[in-house]
Image (cartoon, rainbow, N blue to C red):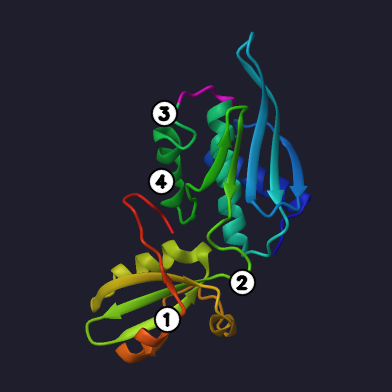
Amino acid sequence: MRPTLTWMMSQFVSFNQRYFQRRLPLPVFRLSKARTFLGNMKWKEDRLKHKYFDYQLTMSEYYDLEEHELQSVMLHEMIHYFIAFNHIKDTSPHGKVFCGIMDKLNACGWNIKVSHHSTENGESSTARKTFRPGRRLIGVFIMKQEIYYAVINPGYVGRIVSGMFSTPDFRELKWYVSNDDYFKQFPLIRSLRGYKINNEKLKELEKIMSPVVLKEGMMI
């Protein structure tokens, strides 16, 4: 789905009540055709009065995404709004305060990520670089005796990882990305399931996939 102004307002009101104690006034909602971000929260600042105003929440309608992912983007921007509106000092745009709130919300089943551009004029955005149109995220699940792979919906990585680590026979999870047309025939998986392969088939697929090397603290 793609966001609409009506959808944005209804989600904002719901999340404001559920997670932010109704403390956030309605911002100005805007839609964009931007390809470089999914969500953007910006405001103006009166430096003399130490006051922020004219809050604007923008979401891109360029990408057709699962609603759960769009909701997570909305929550990402609402965290920025909450911190700015309450004049809470943080160590960085996505510092300890932001990550603390993010972790609490993700514990409720959301998939909020620290992936952004930021500027010094009170602007933050959730960027969509890794999963641009045509690029696929592939998960390879190595079990005790078997190997499976699947083309993953990026918005459901957290759910899949959680399920995999609770599987008794689980041994290793590898991530790859690919632009090859071969992977476009597969549905984007949102639950723990995949296609069984052997080592020879995996080696063949690795010729058209690029491994994702995760650094400490990095999220897919």
Q: Gap in Å between the C-alphas at discs 2 and 3?
A: 36 Å
Asked whether 88 falls inside the magenta stretch, the response is yes
The amino acid type of the residue labelled 1 equals Lys
Q: Residues within 10 Å of mark 2 (few under 14, many from 20)?
A: few
Q: Residue at x 42, y 45 (%)?
A: 104
First-in-chain label (1 vs 2): 2
The label nearer to you, 1 versus 3, is 1
Q: Position of residue 139 (x, y in %)?
A: 41, 73
Q: Residues within 10 Å of mark 1 (few under 14, many from 20)?
A: few
Q: Quadrant of the N terminus?
A: bottom right
Q: Position of residue 172 (x, y in %)?
A: 27, 72
The label nearer to you, 2 versus 3, is 2
Q: Main secondary structure of the magenta part?
A: loop
Residue under label 4: 103
Residues shaded magenta: 85-89
| Residue 138 found in image quarter | bottom left
Residue under label 2: 134
The amino acid type of the residue labelled 2 equals Gly
Q: Gap in Å between the C-alphas at discs 1 and 3?
A: 42 Å
Spot the residue most to the front: 207
Residue under label 3: 91
The amino acid type of the residue labelled 4 equals Asp
Residue 53 appears in the rendering: yes
